[in-house]
Amino acid sequence: MAVPFSLFCLFLLTFASFKCAYADANLTQPSPTPINRDLYHSSSDLIEEIKSLVHRHPDKLTLETMKAVNRGYEAEITAVTYCRNRKESDDRSKFRILLSFGQHGRELITTELALRILSILSEEQFLPKINRATLDSILDKVVIKVVPMENLNGRKLVEAGDLCERRNGRGVDLNRNWGVDWGKKEKVHFGHLFL
């Protein structure tokens, strides 16, 4: 089905007016819409909450912080490892699961989910209508590594007011920083147009 010429012109006019309105805008200025602190922890509060959770449950949780420096740029990642009854078992035969959250700085809700999952794994919170014995038998067979905030530097940019920032402090989008298909454009797929 062909798109009517008038609809196409309307699209171009809308796009052009948007570009004119925002082309010279400084999008790094703090946003007039603040982050709702009733819903989301700050990055430092979230990491402190996770450290406290690990401290309360050393039988199940361990914490490690990794730091790297490259040409003056510093990055830090905190990872929590969950292993049920870790002192009593050989975890080499267990399945490994990696859960990574907050890959983009603006992904506030995913880091909250990481905290929630760790709270459930440590049994401070519970899932409704879940048979605990069944869950425990599954958790006995796995080691789960949780990276609650993969992009701490990008998150700090968001907390400073750049709410749409997805990249890290060096301007790298971690979700696209892979050694494959560099410089290739993805095909644009248009669904069916219903007018």
Image (tube, rainbow, N blue to C red):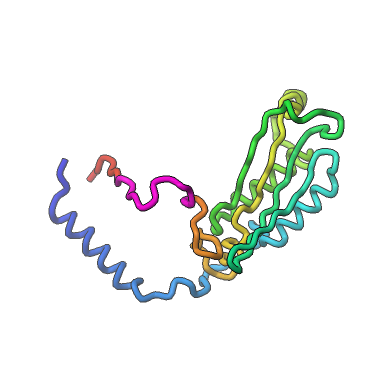
How many numbered marks appear?
Answer: 0
> Which residue sits at x=74%, y=37%?
126
Q: Is residue 135 visible?
A: no
> Which residue sits at x=73%, y=26%?
93
| Relative depth, front residue between 102 and 30 | 102
Quadrant for the N terminus in the image? top left
Which residue is farthest front?
Answer: 71
Residue 1 falls left or right of residue 88: left
Q: Is residue 99 visible?
A: yes
* Residue interval drawn in magenta: 176-188
> Which residue sits at x=75%, y=41%?
125
Place of residue 106 in the rendered image (x, y in percent of width and height, measured from the top left): 54, 58
| Relative depth, front residue between 142 and 32 | 142
Place of residue 124 in the rendered image (x, y in percent of width and height, measured from the top left): 79, 42
Q: Establish if 67 lies above or below 118.
A: below
> Which residue sits at x=56%, y=58%?
105
Q: Is residue 186 magenta?
A: yes
